[in-house]
Image: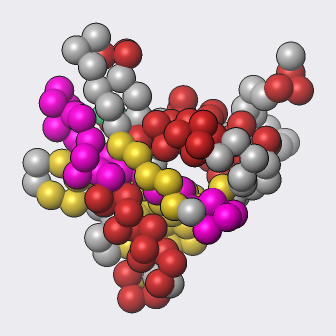
Amino acid sequence: MDKQLHLSYGTIARSELSEQELRLESEALEAARKAYAPYSNFHVGAAVLLENGQIVSGSNQENAAYPSGLCAERTTLFYAGAQYPEVAPLALALVAINQAGRVPLITPCGACRQVMLETAMRFRPYKVLLMGPEETLLIEDCRLLLPFAFDGSDL
Ligand code: THU
Protein backbone atom coordinates (compact mmCIF):
# COMPACT_ATOMS: atom_id res chain seq x y z
CA MET A 1 0.00 0.00 0.00
CA ASP A 2 1.51 3.34 -1.00
CA LYS A 3 -1.14 5.77 0.19
CA GLN A 4 -2.45 6.72 3.59
CA LEU A 5 -5.17 8.88 5.02
CA HIS A 6 -4.57 11.00 8.06
CA LEU A 7 -7.18 12.08 10.58
CA SER A 8 -6.09 14.74 13.00
CA TYR A 9 -8.19 15.42 16.05
CA GLY A 10 -7.72 16.78 19.52
CA THR A 11 -8.93 15.97 22.98
CA ILE A 12 -10.10 18.69 25.33
CA ALA A 13 -10.55 18.20 29.06
CA ARG A 14 -13.72 19.64 30.61
CA SER A 15 -11.70 22.31 32.39
CA GLU A 16 -10.36 23.54 29.04
CA LEU A 17 -13.70 24.01 27.29
CA SER A 18 -14.55 27.57 26.29
CA GLU A 19 -17.72 29.28 27.41
CA GLN A 20 -19.14 28.87 23.94
CA GLU A 21 -18.32 25.14 23.88
CA LEU A 22 -19.98 24.70 27.29
CA ARG A 23 -23.03 26.55 26.01
CA LEU A 24 -23.22 24.25 22.98
CA GLU A 25 -22.91 21.23 25.26
CA SER A 26 -25.74 22.38 27.48
CA GLU A 27 -27.98 23.04 24.46
CA ALA A 28 -27.16 19.57 23.12
CA LEU A 29 -27.91 18.01 26.52
CA GLU A 30 -31.22 19.81 26.73
CA ALA A 31 -32.05 18.51 23.26
CA ALA A 32 -31.03 14.96 24.24
CA ARG A 33 -33.50 15.09 27.11
CA LYS A 34 -36.22 15.80 24.55
CA ALA A 35 -35.30 12.85 22.32
CA TYR A 36 -38.04 10.47 21.24
CA ALA A 37 -36.20 7.20 21.74
CA PRO A 38 -38.64 4.66 23.24
CA TYR A 39 -37.06 1.75 21.34
CA SER A 40 -33.37 2.22 22.04
CA ASN A 41 -33.57 4.37 25.17
CA PHE A 42 -30.50 6.02 23.75
CA HIS A 43 -31.03 9.76 23.84
CA VAL A 44 -28.83 11.78 21.53
CA GLY A 45 -28.64 15.56 21.32
CA ALA A 46 -26.90 17.81 18.82
CA ALA A 47 -26.41 21.56 18.83
CA VAL A 48 -25.18 23.60 15.91
CA LEU A 49 -23.72 27.06 16.25
CA LEU A 50 -24.54 29.11 13.18
CA GLU A 51 -22.57 31.99 11.75
CA ASN A 52 -25.38 34.39 12.73
CA GLY A 53 -24.88 33.44 16.38
CA GLN A 54 -28.02 31.32 16.60
CA ILE A 55 -27.80 27.86 18.16
CA VAL A 56 -30.07 25.23 16.67
CA SER A 57 -30.49 21.93 18.48
CA GLY A 58 -32.23 18.62 17.90
CA SER A 59 -32.50 15.03 19.04
CA ASN A 60 -33.02 11.56 17.65
CA GLN A 61 -36.60 10.79 16.66
CA GLU A 62 -37.41 7.09 16.54
CA ASN A 63 -40.29 5.23 14.94
CA ALA A 64 -41.89 1.80 15.35
CA ALA A 65 -40.85 1.26 11.74
CA TYR A 66 -37.20 1.59 12.80
CA PRO A 67 -35.62 2.95 9.58
CA SER A 68 -38.16 5.77 9.54
CA GLY A 69 -36.50 7.33 12.57
CA LEU A 70 -33.74 9.91 12.33
CA CYS A 71 -30.52 10.60 14.24
CA ALA A 72 -29.98 13.79 16.24
CA GLU A 73 -27.32 15.13 13.86
CA ARG A 74 -29.51 14.95 10.78
CA THR A 75 -32.59 16.21 12.61
CA THR A 76 -30.54 19.22 13.66
CA LEU A 77 -28.74 19.94 10.40
CA PHE A 78 -31.93 19.58 8.37
CA TYR A 79 -33.77 21.83 10.78
CA ALA A 80 -30.96 24.41 10.55
CA GLY A 81 -31.10 24.17 6.76
CA ALA A 82 -34.86 24.57 6.78
CA GLN A 83 -34.84 27.55 9.13
CA TYR A 84 -31.64 29.30 7.99
CA PRO A 85 -30.97 28.12 4.44
CA GLU A 86 -28.28 30.74 3.80
CA VAL A 87 -26.40 30.54 7.11
CA ALA A 88 -23.24 28.47 7.56
CA PRO A 89 -22.70 26.26 10.61
CA LEU A 90 -19.53 26.95 12.57
CA ALA A 91 -19.63 24.01 14.97
CA LEU A 92 -21.71 20.94 15.80
CA ALA A 93 -21.70 19.45 19.30
CA LEU A 94 -22.91 15.92 20.02
CA VAL A 95 -23.85 14.27 23.33
CA ALA A 96 -25.70 11.13 24.38
CA ILE A 97 -27.51 9.83 27.45
CA ASN A 98 -28.46 6.20 28.06
CA GLN A 99 -30.14 4.44 30.98
CA ALA A 100 -26.92 4.63 32.99
CA GLY A 101 -26.58 8.38 32.41
CA ARG A 102 -24.24 10.44 30.30
CA VAL A 103 -22.31 8.44 27.69
CA PRO A 104 -18.52 9.07 27.53
CA LEU A 105 -18.79 10.15 23.91
CA ILE A 106 -20.29 8.95 20.64
CA THR A 107 -19.26 9.40 17.04
CA PRO A 108 -21.79 10.00 14.25
CA CYS A 109 -23.13 7.17 12.09
CA GLY A 110 -22.19 6.97 8.42
CA ALA A 111 -25.40 8.55 7.12
CA CYS A 112 -24.95 11.53 9.45
CA ARG A 113 -21.34 11.92 8.35
CA GLN A 114 -22.57 12.12 4.76
CA VAL A 115 -25.04 14.87 5.64
CA MET A 116 -22.45 16.67 7.76
CA LEU A 117 -20.07 16.58 4.81
CA GLU A 118 -22.60 17.90 2.32
CA THR A 119 -23.44 20.76 4.67
CA ALA A 120 -19.73 21.64 4.74
CA MET A 121 -19.55 21.46 0.91
CA ARG A 122 -22.56 23.75 0.72
CA PHE A 123 -21.01 26.34 3.04
CA ARG A 124 -17.54 25.66 4.45
CA PRO A 125 -15.89 23.16 6.79
CA TYR A 126 -16.98 23.39 10.40
CA LYS A 127 -15.91 21.92 13.74
CA VAL A 128 -17.33 18.81 15.37
CA LEU A 129 -17.25 18.43 19.14
CA LEU A 130 -17.95 14.91 20.39
CA MET A 131 -18.64 15.65 24.01
CA GLY A 132 -18.46 13.36 26.99
CA PRO A 133 -18.72 14.38 30.63
CA GLU A 134 -14.95 14.27 31.05
CA GLU A 135 -13.44 14.55 27.64
CA THR A 136 -14.32 16.14 24.31
CA LEU A 137 -12.98 15.01 21.01
CA LEU A 138 -12.49 17.88 18.59
CA ILE A 139 -12.41 17.42 14.83
CA GLU A 140 -11.63 20.76 13.18
CA ASP A 141 -13.05 19.79 9.78
CA CYS A 142 -16.14 17.60 9.74
CA ARG A 143 -15.22 16.29 6.27
CA LEU A 144 -12.40 14.31 7.82
CA LEU A 145 -14.99 11.99 9.33
CA LEU A 146 -15.88 10.62 5.91
CA PRO A 147 -12.92 9.93 3.66
CA PHE A 148 -13.70 8.91 0.08
CA ALA A 149 -17.16 10.42 0.41
CA PHE A 150 -19.62 10.53 -2.43
CA ASP A 151 -20.56 14.10 -3.22
CA GLY A 152 -22.31 16.25 -5.78
CA SER A 153 -19.23 16.40 -7.99
CA ASP A 154 -19.60 12.66 -8.60
CA LEU A 155 -23.00 13.09 -10.26
N1 THU B 1 -28.23 7.92 17.06
C1 THU B 1 -28.09 9.27 16.88
O1 THU B 1 -29.05 10.05 17.01
N2 THU B 1 -26.87 9.74 16.54
C2 THU B 1 -25.75 8.97 16.45
O2 THU B 1 -24.69 9.49 16.15
C3 THU B 1 -25.82 7.54 16.71
C4 THU B 1 -27.17 6.98 16.90
C5 THU B 1 -29.55 7.42 17.46
C6 THU B 1 -30.27 6.61 16.43
C7 THU B 1 -31.20 5.78 17.31
O3 THU B 1 -32.35 6.54 17.61
C8 THU B 1 -30.40 5.59 18.59
O4 THU B 1 -29.41 6.59 18.59
C9 THU B 1 -29.75 4.22 18.72
O5 THU B 1 -28.99 3.93 17.62
Q: Quadrant of the N terminus?
A: top right
- Quadrant in which ligand 1 is drawn: top left
Q: Position of residue 76 (x, y in %)?
A: 49, 43
Does 50 lie within the magenta span?
yes
- Residue at the outermost top position: 65
Q: Quadrant of residue 3?
A: top right
Q: Position of residue 95 (x, y in %)?
A: 36, 56
Q: Is residue 114 visible?
A: yes
Q: Position of residue 154 (x, y in %)?
A: 86, 21
- Residue at the outermost bottom position: 15
Q: Residue at x 46, y 37 (%)?
A: 75
In the image, residue 147 sits, relative to residue 140, either above or below, namely above
Residue 109 placement, left or right of 89: left
Q: Residue at x 79, y 41 (%)?
A: 122
Residue 86 placement, left or right of 19: right
Q: Residue at x 38, y 72 (%)?
A: 135
Q: Quadrant of residue 118?
A: top right
Q: Quadrant of the C terminus?
A: top right
Residue 38 placement, left or right of 127: left
Q: Quadrant of residue 153?
A: top right
- Residue at the outermost left position: 100
Does 61 lie within the magenta span?
no
> Which residues make up the magenta segment?
31-53
Q: Residue at x 72, y 54 (%)?
A: 88
